[in-house]
Image (cartoon, helix red, strand yellow):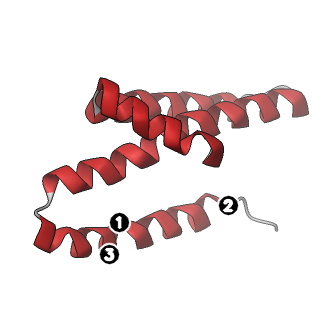
Amino acid sequence: MGVLLVVGGRLGDKFGRRRLFLIGLTGFTLASVACGLAFGPASVIGFRLLQGAFGALVIPQGFGILGEVFPPHELGKAFGVFAPCLGLSAIGARPSEA
């Protein structure tokens, strides 16, 4: 995912943040379903790669949309709420080790 973040951001600049956000979110969701239905380790790895690629479309668009929607003096508050949500979602998405 990290490798494609810059590409995802540029695609959003070129084709529209909203469109790329929705494409990324849909693709990530479908790749997540595919991971759950995977038939072996190789397919899980492939679907996880797809998740990362689509995730690289979602994250930069989210930051860009925040920058467009909030005025400059409120941008710090917006990112202050957005960043912990990202962190909590990463923690919540981890599979349990029990």
Residue on which the image places disc 3: 80
Quadrant hosting residue 72: bottom left
Mark with earlier residue (3, 2) = 3
Q: Which amino acid lies under the numbered mark 1 shown in the image of this protein?
A: Phe
Q: Residues within 10 Å of mark 2 (few under 14, many from 20)?
A: few
Question: Which quadrant, please, contains the N terminus?
Answer: top right
**Disc 1 versus disc 2: distance between alpha carbons?**
19 Å
Q: Which mark is residue 82?
A: 1
- The residue under the point 44% across, 48% down is 59
- The residue under the point 45% across, 33% down is 24
Q: Which amino acid lies under the numbered mark 2 shown in the image of this protein?
A: Arg
Give coordinates of residue 98: x percent, y percent. Answer: 82, 68
Q: Are marks 3 and 1 in contact (CB under 8 Å)?
A: yes
Give coordinates of residue 39: x percent, y percent. Answer: 84, 25
Instruction: Decide: is 47 above or below 84.
Output: above
Q: Which mark is residue 94?
A: 2
Q: How many marks?
A: 3
Q: Residues within 10 Å of mark 3 (few under 14, many from 20)?
A: few
